[in-house]
Image: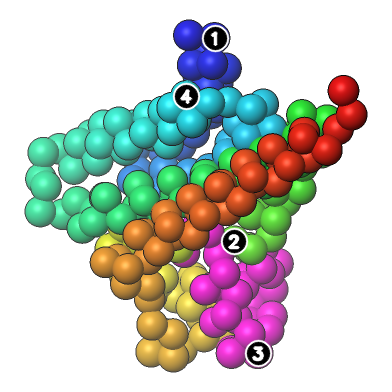
Amino acid sequence: RAAFARALPLAAVGMLGALPAPERPSSIALLAWLALWSPVAGFLAGSQRLRALAAASIPAAWMVAFVLVESAALGGDAVRGVPAPAGAAMAWSGLFAAGFGLGRAAGPSRRWRGAGLVAAAAAALSGAALAFGLADAPWPAEVSARLLDASPVVLVVEAAGVADWMWHPSTYEAAGVDRYARAPYGAALAGPLALVVGCALAALGAALARGERAEQPG
């Protein structure tokens, strides 16, 4: 019960992305927020040595928030909803698991410093292709395309099956990438692959933490 109490604030921060925009909640805004927050929440959960079940409840709770946002945003019109919500859930769970593994390896003493570094890395990877809105087409097109590939936000949204969201001029033109020069992530593969890689990193982090504790005297 105490472990779930420690998990609750991490889940609650993720749900902040479900707050309504000026007119109505936005599924894409929630996905973008979860893409940024999930590795940070995973790191904090891992560094606190949360048990697996309590940690897994955090990304699971976000699925409830996502369903509520989808329902509110669409007014019951499921046809216009996110095509692959399960893919998005697997993608943010994979990012959470990757952060969890890093947190387990880092340990409690590096909790806040590590979480800050993970947050900075997620933000940097998500904004680098657009130079954080400070300049148009800041990099060569091939570099911008690879930076888009590395973005957690791009991963989660495209894993949800929203393949055309990046085709808006405010994104592709600002990054200097022709919209036909970069293929979006496939929803059928991106989410499961992110989850597998994230779980592998979580297992590796747990193994490193056990090894470090075993080496400590007494």
Q: Quadrant of residue 191?
A: bottom left
Main SS of the magenta segment?
helix
Residue appearing at x 54%, y 73% in the figure: 148
Q: Which residues are magenta?
A: 128-154
The amino acid on which the numbered mark 1 sits, given as a three-letter code, is Ala
Q: Which residue is mark 2?
A: 126
* Residue 70 in the figure: left or right of residue 33: left
Classify mark 1: helix, strand or loop: helix
- Whether residue 6 is visible, yes or no, is yes
Contact (CB < 8 A) between labels 3 and 4? no
Where's residue 197, x and y in %? 49, 59
Residue closer to the observer: 182 or 199? 199
Q: CA distance from mark 1 to mark 2?
A: 34 Å
Classify mark 2: helix, strand or loop: helix
**Mark 1 or mark 3, earlier in chain:** 1
Indicate yes or no whether the magenta region holds residue 182.
Answer: no
Q: CA distance from mark 4 to mark 1?
A: 9 Å
Residue closer to the observer: 32 or 199? 199
Q: Which residue is mark 4?
A: 54
Q: CA distance from mark 2 to mark 3?
A: 17 Å
Which label belongs to residue 140?
Answer: 3
Q: Which residue is mark 1?
A: 2
Residue that extends furthest to the top in the rendered view of this protein: 1
The amino acid on which the numbered mark 4 sits, given as a three-letter code, is Ala
**Mark 2 or mark 4, earlier in chain:** 4
